[in-house]
Amino acid sequence: MKPEAEQPVPMTESPDAGQQGHVDDHVQRVHPRKAIYLLPNLITTGALFAGFFAMLRAIQGDFEQASIAVFVAMLLDGLDGRVARLTGTQSAFGVQYDSLSDVIAFGLAPAVVVFLWSLYGIGDRWGMLGAFVFVASAAIRLARFNVQVETVDKRYFVGLASPAAAAVLMGMVWFFEEQQIPFYENIGWVWVITVTTGLLMVSSLPYYSFKSVSPRLRVSFLSVPVLILIFVLALKDFALTLWLLALGYALSAPLWFLGRRLKRLVVRRPSGS
């Protein structure tokens, strides 16, 4: 009698196998493997380095080079977002990294440059207070921008943008250092400009963002000679041109607000008065 052949035992999945696979999937969802896009974040890193370089040059007493470095940071800051959109490499990491870079390049760096250039001469630490108001305002403005970015009108910024605020201070330093005019001795005026610019960042005044500008935009005939005048002025004195443009942009919202209030007062005034 032949012994019965052993029947193959069917392979059954271990009850723990499915659970282990579920755990692995859960771990991958909780701790996903992510990398960052190189190109836009590399440009952001360049802007961050330019702000850091500006502080180093200010410590060494070269305020003209320090102010120019902040303008280089502005140029790079304007490129990283556009490069990310053109190449489809936008990410939440890039947004947060750009904001942190802006705090350093357009908040801390200009404040340090202006403090070492002029504000340190004020007694009782008023200079330090003025510089810190600018730094804190830049940080608050950027945090508010990140929170409100999906809810506000894209055509306008709420408050003065931090790169524009930095341009007001660095354009001032660059122009007066280039012309060798000792404006830094007017510490009171420098303090007022620094604090006022900082407060404009945290204001609720609307500033045109220029995001709706396109090559097909139609402008009046008066815009042509104005642009030619700006171009000629830039060729003659580039630092002065940048500073005047930054000042004009910073003052545009307050002047618009005052003009609107005056217009309302005129309309409400009785016709017989």
Image (cartoon, grey):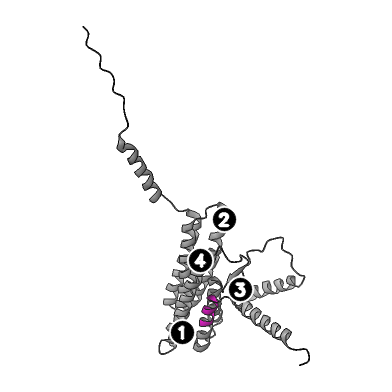
Q: Pick whichever of labels 4 and 1 is earlier in the sequence.
A: 1
Labels 4, 1: front one:
4
Type of amino acid under label 3 = Pro
Q: Secondary structure at mark 2?
A: helix
Labels 3, 4: front one:
4
Residue tagged 3: 206
Residue tagged 1: 119
Type of amino acid under label 1 = Leu
Give the Cα distance between marks 1 and 3.
Answer: 29 Å
At x 71%, y 74%, the residue is 226
**Dots 1 and 3: beta carbons under 8 Å?**
no
Give the Cα distance between marks 2 and 3.
Answer: 25 Å
Q: Which mark is residue 85?
A: 2
Tell me which corner region of the image, top left, top right, bottom left or bottom right, holds residue 4: top left
Which residue ends up furthest to the top in the rendered image? 1
Tell whether position 199 is magenta: yes
